[in-house]
Image (spheres, rainbow, N blue to C red):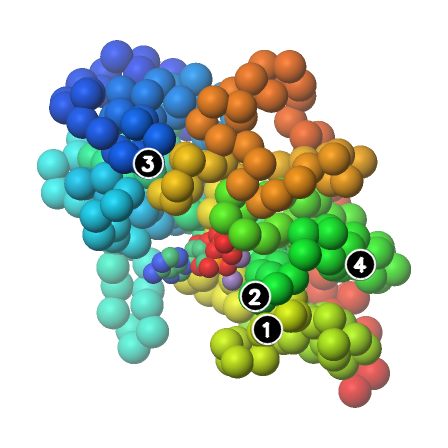
Amino acid sequence: HSMPDHMPGSSAAATDVALTSPSRVVYPDAGIRKQEVFAYYRDMLPWLLPEVVGRPVSVVRCPQGTQRPCFFQKHLPPGTGHVGTVPIEEEGGTRADYIVVRDAAGLLELVQFNALEFHPWGARADAPDLADRIVFDLDPGPGVAWARVVAAARQVRDHLRELGLESFVRTSGGKGLHVVVPLRPACEWSQVKAFARAFAEAMATADPLAYVATASKRQRKGRIFIDYLRNGRGATSVASFSLRARPGAPVAMPLRWEELGRVRRADAYDIASAPRRMKRMKQHPWGDIDRIRQDLAPIAARLAGRN
Ligand code: ATP
Ligand code: MN
Ligand code: MN
């Protein structure tokens, strides 16, 4: 597999990557061109890189723009030079090379290859069997008002806090919110998955009119699906600061919990307003998320013991 020489952080200049077809329209609804997408990612590198570097990552590529078919890809497109890969054992014992971004040039090269969305694993490439982030993906069904999605995120936060776990929130850039729990030390996927499932099912059992924890579409009308399925080996969630291949070029935006009440929709931030916000904020809304020590193992063991 190809591994670039640059070490993480060594700033391979953005100019290493040549942009082709800069004036091709990527978001026809908003008249946004490839050069603007590239400029967005170049400007947001300091925020986005820490979210993706060193993790297996899938990309949503839209070679003909967002209104033509897009492709969710975990393997490297041929022809790249700055992007790394990591061999990962898949179910059935086969090994496949997954995309790993090591630096700025790798990320921008994927953009040059028409990647619009970045979806990292909740695990690092050098330890793919250990989760260092749990994601509760809150998906509002038809007819659910935004205020209820906000209330659901806060309820997830409060329940996690009762268990001794701190969490963080972001807009998905689509319809819902993600509540993210950092884990240090990282934890076996089997344990993380069982915990996330039990957590979601407990919320659905306690308030079945508000929440559902099963994937079946027909139960979602008027309810919020607490999608715990992001939490398995090989599963991904959109990275904070990634664009979405959806109308208006929205962005998945991390928030401070105090800000959540002022945000009106999941796609409130977009390719124009997200960089403005981060210029104003100067600090990551999630602060020191990667410094927090919280060990899931004893908590999960205690909960499992209760059943
Ligand atoms: P929304 O708020 O609209 O739900 P979302 O990003 O949470 O936005 P979901 O459909 O809830 O979207 O979650 C899908 C997640 O599953 C994505 O974030 C992505 O990481 C992952 N995923 C796995 N396979 C695919 C695929 N083939 N296409 C799109 N996403 C996929
Ligand atoms: Mn979702
Ligand atoms: Mn979902």
Secondary structure of the residue carrying numbered label 2: loop
Q: Are marks 2 and 3 in contact (CB under 8 Å)?
A: no
| Residue that badge 1 annotates | 221
Residue 225 picture location, percent across and down: 61, 68
| Residue that badge 2 annotates | 142
Q: For residue 29, which numbered disc appears in the image? A: 3
In the figure, 154 relative to 81: above or below?
below
Quarter of the figure that contains the C terminus: bottom right
Amino acid type assigned to the residue bearing label 4 in the image: Gln
Name the residue: 32% across, 13% down: 13
Residue 10 in the figure: left or right of residue 276 = left
Measure the alpha-carbon separation of dots 3 and 1.
28 Å
Hey, which residue is sitting farthest left in the picture?
79
Secondary structure of the residue carrying numbered label 4: helix
Task: Let me know if residue 10 appears in the view.
Answer: no
Measure the alpha-carbon separation of dots 1 and 2.
5 Å
Measure the alpha-carbon separation of dots 2 and 4.
20 Å
Amino acid type assigned to the residue bearing label 2 in the image: Pro
Measure the alpha-carbon separation of dots 4 and 1.
20 Å
